[in-house]
Image (spheres, rainbow, N blue to C red):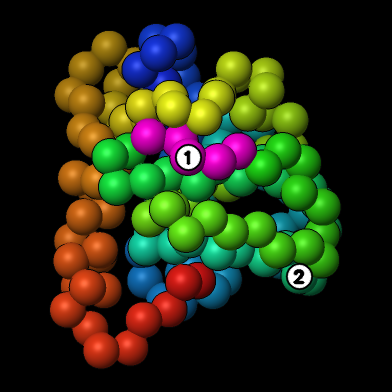
Amino acid sequence: MWLMNRRTGGAVASHVELACTRATRRQGLLQRDGLDPSAAMILAPCFLIHTGFMRFSIDVLFIDGESAVCRVVPNLPPWRMAGDLRGRTVIELAGGTAAERDVRVGDQLYLSAAVSGGERSLSAVVGPGLRKLASSPARSGA
C-alpha cells in the first residue's frame, strides 16, 4: 500500500503500516531502532502522540477528517509530545521525510494499492475506527 500526495502526485511512503487498535497504537514505533524513509505508520483514531522511550526522531503529520494535513511536526525528537485537536489521524515518518517529499499543511493524502491505481482516502480506510470511537463512551487520543 502506498501513501500518496494529491498535490504533488508523488509517493510519501511505499510501505504503510496501520495502527488502528488500542494495542497497535500504544506499541507504535517503540522498540525499533529507526524507520525506513520509504515507510509510514498511520495511527487512527489519534490526535496526540508522544515519543517517550523512542530511539530516533520522526516527522509527524496530523490529518483532519477530510484527509488533509492540518499540522506538520518535523524531526520530533525522543521524549516529546505533539498534538492537534483538529487531527483525526496521525502519520509518522522517518525524520526529514516530510520536507524531502514536500508534504505541506493543506495537502490531501490518500492510500493507493499501487502508484498508479486504486486510490482510497485516508478517512475511508480508518473511518470504521473513527465511527467506533464516536459511539464509545470512553475516548482515547492515543
Amino acid, disc 2 = Gly
Q: Report the label total.
A: 2
Judge left or right: residue 67 versus residue 89: left
- Say which label, 2 or 1, has the lower sequence index: 2
User: Local crowd at mark 2 within 10 Å, few (<14), some, or many (≥20)?
Assistant: few
The residue at the far bottom in this view is: 137
Tell me where residue 127 appears, x and y as whole percent.
Answer: 21, 55
Q: Is residue 85 above or below residue 135?
A: above
Amino acid, disc 1 = Cys
- Structural distance between the alpha carbons of marks 2 and 1: 23 Å
**In percent of the image, x 65 and y 58: which residue is there?**
82
Query: For mark 2, what is the residue?
Result: 52
Which residue range is magenta in the image?
68-72
Q: Mostly what secondary structure, the magenta segment?
A: strand
- Evaluate if marks 2 and 1 touch, with contact meaning CB atoms under 8 Å apart: no
Tell me where residue 11 appears, x and y as whole percent.
Answer: 46, 19
Residue 139 marker: none
Query: For mark 1, what is the residue?
Result: 70
Judge left or right: residue 2 versus residue 15: left
Judge left or right: residue 130 versus residue 41: left
Q: Can residue 71 be found in the magenta stretch?
A: yes
Tell me where residue 140 appears, x and y as whole percent.
Answer: 43, 78
On the image, which quarter does residue 130 sit in?
A: bottom left
**In percent of the image, x 27 and y 53: which residue is there?**
126
